[in-house]
């Protein structure tokens, strides 16, 4: 286990290093010159002013040198200063990231509870109307893009019925839950469909195992058979998929935050790209990639704990 953890951590660091270079190079390959923006626009631009700005922000150095300087500063938690706001990038992320984290956590609770419950219910009643209803509903939910679902929820529950606010993240626990309900539901719809289908298939596979048939034939109550032998053996793929979906949500809140006017890192990224605020865009993208890699690594490390068969197979190997 220690060797496996070491390998996974080494892979995590290598992935983050490669991702950081791709992010840095891609941002500087984008159209537009940050030196022009920093100099105050083309109306007041002179060659001398442009050269001074490039020298001040080290934009006249080779790309590899700029990347090395940026990476060294990132390792010391110095993410630079925003071109647009003039504030430290770390302060901007600290102010915006909690909103995104709350939104993702809320959506995760929704799609885990509803998705796993619906998938297990469909699998244990396969061939009946409940199974068909769950499959049909999840197919419809998966076919609707999150931003379209968000607009529909705003129009119905925010504008027509007035049950929920359509902008802002609220204050306090009750206020936050009230404000984030609609965006969390819109974000969880597609994930709910994926998790439900994976859960259904995993439960069907586990229910068809030989030891489950033996447990039923021995007279064990159906509730105990489902709890101890079916759901327990189906946990591996379910937890893996839930982790992957959650990691993807951390990097995919842009559309939902834009629709509902939330001040999260997704909307911060959109504003940074539109204004050529390169330090902010780089930091947000790096944060998203880091969250995704860390979550997927934790899921991979926890997988053998959920499925003892994998641990036994690896020990034998």
Image (cartoon, rainbow, N blue to C red):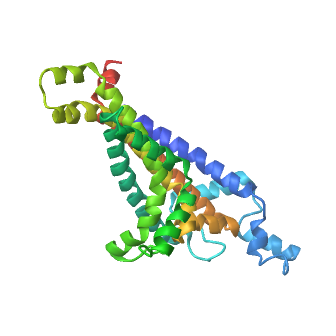
Q: Position of residue 289 (x, y in %)?
A: 53, 51
Q: Residue furthest left?
A: 219
Q: Quadrant of the C terminus?
A: top left
Q: Can you give x and y, in whole percent of width and height, for residue 218 in the image?
A: 13, 21
* Left-right relation of 67 to 42: left
Q: Is residue 250 visible?
A: yes
Q: Residue at x 59, y 47 (%)?
A: 19
Return the residue found at the far front. 129
Q: Residue 161: x, y in percent?
A: 45, 74
Name the residue located 74 percent from the left edge and 57 percent from the top edge: 30
Residue found 50% across the figure and 72% down from its top: 91
Above or below — where is 286 with respect to 178? above
Name the image quarter holding the N terminus: top left
Q: Determine the residue located farthest toward the right in the rendered image.
A: 47
Residue 6 image position (x, y, % from top left): 40, 37
Q: Is residue 37 above or below residue 201?
A: below
Q: Quadrant of residue 297?
A: top left
Q: Residue at x 84, y 76 (%)?
A: 42
Residue 301 visible in the current orientation: no
Identify which residue, 301 or 60, lies in the foreground: 301
Q: Is residue 293 left or right of residue 54?
A: left
| 225, 101: nearer the viewer | 225
How many numbered discs sit on the rendered protein? 0
Vertical placement of 234 versus 259: above or below?
above
Q: Identify the image quadrant of residue 134.
A: top left
């Amino acid at each position: 286990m220690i060797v496996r953890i070491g390998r996974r951590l080494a892979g995590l660091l290598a992935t983050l290093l490669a991702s950081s270079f791709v992010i840095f190079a891609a941002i500087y390959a984008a159209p537009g010159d940050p030196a022009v923006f920093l100099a105050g626009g083309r109306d007041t631009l002179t060659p001398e002013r442009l050269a001074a700005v490039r020298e001040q922000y080290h934009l006249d150095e080779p790309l590899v040198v700029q990347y090395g300087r940026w990476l060294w500063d990132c390792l010391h938690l110095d993410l630079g200063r925003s071109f647009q706001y003039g504030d430290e990038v770390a302060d901007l992320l600290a102010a915006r990231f909690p909103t995104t984290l709350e939104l993702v956590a809320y959506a995760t609770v929704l799609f885990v509870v509803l998705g796993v419950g619906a998938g297990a219910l469909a699998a244990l009643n396969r061939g009946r109307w409940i199974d068909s209803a769950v499959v049909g509903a999840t197919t419809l939910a998966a076919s609707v893009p999150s931003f379209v679902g968000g607009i529909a929820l705003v129009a119905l529950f925010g504008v027509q019925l007035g049950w929920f606010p359509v902008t802002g993240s609220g204050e306090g626990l009750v206020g936050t839950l009230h404000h984030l309900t609609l965006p969390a539901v819109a974000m969880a719809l597609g994930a709910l469909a994926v998790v439900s289908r994976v859960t259904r298939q995993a439960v069907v596979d586990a229910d068809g195992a030989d030891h489950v048939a033996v447990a039923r034939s021995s007279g064990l109550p159906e509730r105990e058979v489902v709890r101890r032998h079916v759901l327990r053996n189906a946990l591996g793929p379910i937890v893996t998929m839930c982790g992957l979906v959650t990691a993807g949500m951390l990097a995919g809140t842009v559309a939902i935050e834009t629709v509902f006017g939330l001040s999260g890192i997704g909307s911060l990224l959109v504003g940074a790209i539109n204004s050529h605020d390169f330090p902010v865009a780089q930091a947000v993208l790096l944060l998203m990639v880091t969250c995704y890699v860390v979550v997927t690594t934790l899921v991979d490390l926890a997988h053998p704990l959920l499925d003892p068969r994998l641990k036994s197979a690896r020990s034998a190997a």
